[in-house]
C-alpha cells in the first residue's frame, strides 16, 4: 500500500476532522418544547411565550433557565402585576451562563453572582439584575435576587434537562422576589409614539405622520401590536420632494407602508424570512415587502429598494420601533428605474480621413524564426523583450511537469485505497 503525499494526507485529515465536527454539532434548543414535556411547568412555559422570552432564550447559545412549577407561578400571578413587570421577573430567572446540576455543587469558593436577562435589558438598577447562587450544607444550593440583600429565598430542586454547554433547565423552589423587577412599568401603548420617534432621530418622519391621517391608524394598532420602521431624519428629509409630488392617497399609503399591524421583536426579525403585510395592505393592493436576514443584519426588500435596520428605538411588547437607512418605496407607487442607455457612438466626420496602418499580426510560436538562442534581446529603445519561441517552450515544459506531478498524486491516492 502506497502512502499519500504529505499535502494530500494533511488535506484528508482536515476533511475528516471537519466531518466529525459537523456530525457532533448540537441542534438549536427550543425551551418551549423542553418544558412541554413537563406539565408541572405549563404556566411558566405559557408566560415565556406570551412575553416573547422564549424566543430570546432560543437565540442564546449558553444559558440557564430557572423554571418554577405551577403553584410557584400562582403566587406570582396573585400579585396582579402587568405583563411587562411579569416579563422583568421572569427575565431574572434566565441566567446568562451554563449551570448544570454538577456545576451548581462545584461553584468556586461556594458562591457565584450570575448575570441575568433582566440585567441585559439595561433597566435593572444597581445589582438587581444579578442572582446570587450559593452551595449550602447538606447538598442544597440557594438562589437569591441580587437586589434583595443577598437573601437566598429559593433552593435548587432538580435538573429538568441539560445540553452541555448550550442550555440547562433547572427547577428552583419558588419565584425570586425583586422589588425592582416587580415595579410598575408603563406599557408602550401608554407612550407617545411620535414623541419617541422625534426624540431619537426620526423627527421628520414623525412630523409627517402627525400632519396626516396615518397617525390615527398607527395609534389604533398600538394595543393589538405594532411594528414601525422609521427612516432617519437625513434619509426622509432628502425624500420629501418626491413625497410632496404624491397624491393624497399616495402619501397616506406610503406612511402606512412603514408599519405592520403585529408586534415583531428584533430577535424574531433576525430569525424569520418572508413577506410582511403592512398597514397599507388592502385587498388587491398588496403593499407588502420581504424581510430577509443574514446573521445580525436584517433587510426590508421592496420591488424598488432594499433598506437595512440600523437601530432600535423601542422593542417591548406590543410595540417595536426600528430605524432604517432608506425610505421604503412600494411598487404600487413607484416604478423601478430603468438602466441608463449606453451612449450612442459619435458620428463620423464627412471629411476624408487618413487610413491608419494596422499593427503587424503577432507571430505564432510555429512561425517563430530560428534565431540565435539568446534568452533576451534589446530593442532600439533599450527595453527588453523575450524570445517568443524559447518563452513558450519554457511555459509548455513547466505545464507538462505540473501535469506529471498531479498524475502521480492522483495515482498514489487511488493506490492507497
Image (tube, helix red, strand yellow):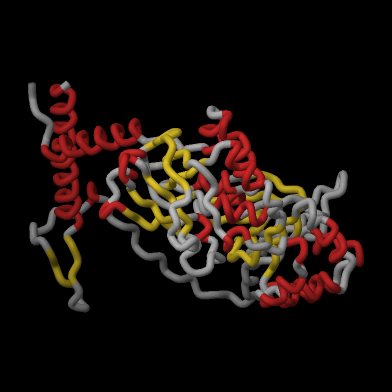
Residue 400 seen in the current view: no
Q: Is residue 312 left or right of residue 149?
A: right
Residue 365 position in % (x across, y down) = 23, 50
Indicate whether 374 appears above or below 406: below
Q: Is residue 327 left or right of residue 382?
A: right
Q: Indicate the position of residue 122 as horizontal and vertical percent values.
A: 53, 65
Which residue is found at the position 36% from the left and 42% from the top?
140
Residue located farthest toward the front when viewing the structure as drawn: 138
Image quarter of the C terminus: top left
Observer able to see residue 136: yes
Residue nearer the viewer, 99 or 328 = 99
Q: The N terminus lies in which quarter of the figure? A: top left
Report the residue at 17% width, 59% height from top.
387
Q: Nearer the viewer, residue 340 or 291?
A: 291
Picture residue at 18% right of the left edge, 62% below the top: 386
The residue located at (51%, 33%) in the rendering is: 34
Amino acid at each position: 500500500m502506497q502512502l499519500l503525499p504529505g499535502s494530500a494526507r494533511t488535506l484528508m485529515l482536515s476533511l475528516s476532522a471537519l466531518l466529525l465536527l459537523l456530525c457532533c454539532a448540537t441542534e438549536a434548543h427550543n425551551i418551549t418544547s423542553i418544558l412541554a414535556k413537563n406539565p408541572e411547568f405549563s404556566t411558566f412555559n405559557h408566560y415565556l411565550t406570551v412575553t416573547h422570552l422564549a424566543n430570546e432564550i432560543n437565540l442564546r447559545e449558553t444559558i440557564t433557565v430557572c423554571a418554577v412549577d405551577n403553584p410557584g407561578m400562582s403566587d406570582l400571578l396573585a400579585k396582579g402585576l402587568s405583563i411587562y413587570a411579569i416579563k422583568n421577573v421572569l427575565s431574572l430567572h434566565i441566567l446568562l451562563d451554563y449551570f448544570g446540576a454538577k456545576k451548581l455543587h462545584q461553584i468556586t469558593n461556594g458562591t457565584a453572582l450570575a448575570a441575568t436577562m433582566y440585567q441585559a435589558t439595561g433597566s435593572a438598577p444597581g445589582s438587581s439584575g444579578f442572582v446570587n447562587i450559593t452551595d449550602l450544607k447538606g447538598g442544597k444550593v440557594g438562589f437569591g435576587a441580587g437586589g434583595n440583600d443577598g437573601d437566598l429565598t429559593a433552593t435548587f430542586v432538580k435538573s429538568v434537562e441539560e445540553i452541555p454547554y448550550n442550555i440547562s433547565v433547572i427547577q428552583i423552589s419558588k419565584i425570586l422576589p425583586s422589588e425592582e423587577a416587580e415595579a410598575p412599568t408603563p406599557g408602550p401603548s401608554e407612550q407617545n409614539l411620535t414623541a419617541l420617534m422625534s426624540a431619537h432621530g426620526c423627527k421628520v418622519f414623525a412630523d409627517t405622520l402627525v400632519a396626516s391621517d396615518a397617525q390615527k391608524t398607527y395609534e389604533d394598532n398600538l394595543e393589538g401590536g405594532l411594528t414601525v420602521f422609521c427612516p432617519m431624519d437625513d434619509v426622509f428629509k432628502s425624500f420629501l420632494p418626491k413625497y410632496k409630488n404624491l397624491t393624497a392617497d399616495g402619501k397616506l399609503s406610503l406612511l402606512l407602508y412603514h408599519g405592520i399591524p403585529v408586534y415583531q421583536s428584533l430577535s424574531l426579525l433576525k430569525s424569520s424570512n418572508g413577506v410582511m403585510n403592512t398597514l397599507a395592505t388592502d385587498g388587491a393592493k398588496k403593499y407588502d415587502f420581504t424581510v430577509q436576514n443574514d446573521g445580525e443584519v436584517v433587510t426590508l426588500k421592496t420591488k424598488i429598494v432594499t433598506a437595512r435596520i440600523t437601530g432600535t428605538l423601542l422593542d417591548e411588547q406590543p410595540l417595536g420601533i426600528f430605524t432604517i437607512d432608506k425610505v421604503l418605496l412600494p411598487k404600487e407607487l413607484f416604478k423601478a428605474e430603468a438602466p441608463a442607455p449606453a451612449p450612442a457612438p459619435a458620428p463620423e466626420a464627412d471629411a476624408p480621413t487618413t487610413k491608419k496602418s494596422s499593427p503587424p499580426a503577432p507571430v505564432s510560436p510555429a512561425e517563430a524564426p530560428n534565431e540565435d538562442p539568446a534568452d533576451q534581446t534589446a530593442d532600439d529603445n533599450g527595453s527588453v523583450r523575450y524570445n517568443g519561441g524559447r518563452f513558450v517552450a519554457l511555459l509548455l515544459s513547466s505545464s507538462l511537469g505540473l501535469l506529471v506531478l498531479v498524475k502521480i498524486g492522483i495515482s498514489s491516492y487511488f493506490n492507497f485505497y
